[in-house]
Amino acid sequence: MSKKISHDDLVKKALANPKVKKEYNSLEAEFNLLNEMIKARKKSGKTQQEVAKRMHTSTSVIGRLEGLLGNTSKPSPTLATLRKYAEAIDCELKIKIVPKNHDDTTTV
């Protein structure tokens, strides 16, 4: 019988490979945006269905949008789409460019 490996151990093992770690790190911004989107939607109290209705689209489109980021085989959503999503959850979209290796209090 094979020993089960925990998710954390699997991630640790995968990230020990320099190629995997480089690709993982290159997707950090997308994963952060995805987490922020889902967190903001949940904080707004809206379901994917409610967001879809406000954006005049289907629930499956919202599901794909929330799962799209970090998937390099699919095109990234446009700024217009991200803006509509933000408005649908009563938020605004803000984008900033910051120097690499910055702390969160420094902006350009």
Image: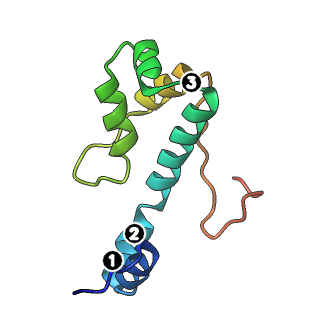
Q: Residue at x 41, y 72 (%)?
A: 7
| Helix, strand or loop status at disc 3 | loop
Q: Quadrant of residue 90?
A: top right
Badge 1 is on which residue?
20
The amino acid beneath tag 3 is Ile
Residue 24 is marked as: 2
Residue found 52% across the figure and 48% down from its top: 35
Measured in 3D between alpha carbons, the distance from the residue under mark 2 to the one under mark 3, in whole angstroms, is 29 Å
The image position of residue 9, as x and y in percent, is 43, 81
Q: CA distance from mark 2 to mark 1?
A: 6 Å
Mark 2 and mark 3 lie on one chain; the one further toward the N terminus is: 2
* Dot 1 alpha-carbon crowd within 10 angstroms: few under 14, some 14 to 19, many 20 or more: few
Q: Position of residue 25 (x, y in %)?
A: 44, 69
Amino acid carrying mark 1 in the image: Val
Give the SS element for disc 1: helix
At 51% from the left edge and 40% from the top edge, which residue is drawn?
A: 38
Q: Which residue is label 3 attached to? A: 89
Quarter placement of the N terminus: bottom left
